[in-house]
Amino acid sequence: MAKPKIAFFEFTSCEGCQLTVVDSLQDHPELLDAVEIVQFREAMSEKGEDYQIAFIEGSCSRPGDEAKLNEIREKADLVIALGACAHLGGVNAIRNRMPLEDVRKYVYGDKAEWYATYPARPISAVIPIDAVIPGCPIDRNEFIRAVTYLLQGRLPYIPDNPVCIECKLKGNVCVYHRGMTCLGPITLAGCDAICPTYGEGCDGCRGLISAPNIPALRTVLAEHGMNETDIEAKMTVFLTYQRMELEAADHDS
């Protein structure tokens, strides 16, 4: 039986998720025997245009990205968003709350007009996707599990639980009791609560759960010493695009 052909693509990102893929495959070489990788710039120079599964890292941040995304969607049977930039717009979406021309001038100076750019978006805003592997970067074990599911003819499954559930299961002391703040109550679990486990509050890189109580969390953050500017900054790192969508939906309703 022919091996499924897999391709990796990158748009606006640091490519850290693809490096995590390379790292994870070193511990699971058996997967390399089960698939044929035809495109993967981080790991190989060869390039094939025939593929069934496409993993895409990075946000769509330029008009020219759309044609390539549509081309990938037309060729691939399955498209998987790889990491926070492809899933959420990532840190690139922070600029979406500022005037685009101001951002362009700040980044490119007097060459601002040389570069085509527009508000950063997740790839699902441009093309239909079949699954997501969240995180910044992705979790290596979750990637291996996702590929295993795909080889079994199943789509990766992400439970709709907050990070707090994983902290409880690991027996972690809540970071709020340690003088820190955390977005765990509104953030999708699946990372094994890695940041709180190692003494850092969650910044929301896996995106929002389906019914996040953002006003309640803002109150908790304020009660723990954060002012409105700091709260907004913390909630903006990874959640800008999702929050703007929620705000637009609330406005329309």
Image: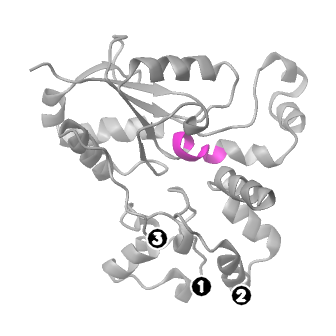
Magenta region includes residue 211: no
The local secondary structure at tag 1 comes to loop
One can see residue 47 in this view: no
Label disc, if present, on residue 223 of the rendered structure: 2
Magenta segment, prevailing SS (helix, strand or loop): helix
Q: Which residues are magenta?
A: 85-91
Q: How far is mark 2 from mark 3, CA to CA?
A: 21 Å
Front position among marks 1 and 2? 2
In percent of the image, x 22 and y 24: which residue is there? 4
Could you tell which of marks 2 and 3 lies nearer the N-terminus?
3
Q: Residue furthest left?
A: 1
| Quadrant in which residue 211 is drawn | bottom right
Residue type, label 1: Gly
Is 78 on the left-hand or right-hand side of 195? left
The local secondary structure at tag 3 comes to loop
Would you name the residue on which mark 3 appears? Answer: 162
Label 1: how many residues lie within 10 Å, few (<14), some (14-19) or many (20+)? few
Is 59 on the left-hand or right-hand side of 160? right
| Quadrant in which residue 222 is drawn | bottom right
Residue 206, percent from left and from top: 50, 56
**Count of residue discs:** 3
Could you tell which of marks 3 and 1 lies nearer the N-terminus?
3
Marks 2 and 3: CB-CB under 8 Å?
no
Task: Classify the position of the N terminus by image quarter.
Answer: top left
Task: Classify the position of the C terminus by image quarter.
Answer: bottom right
Instruction: Tell which of 134 and 246 is nearer to you.
Output: 246
Residue type, label 3: Pro
The local secondary structure at tag 2 comes to helix
Residue 139, percent from left and from top: 37, 51
Label disc, if present, on residue 179 of the rendered structure: 1
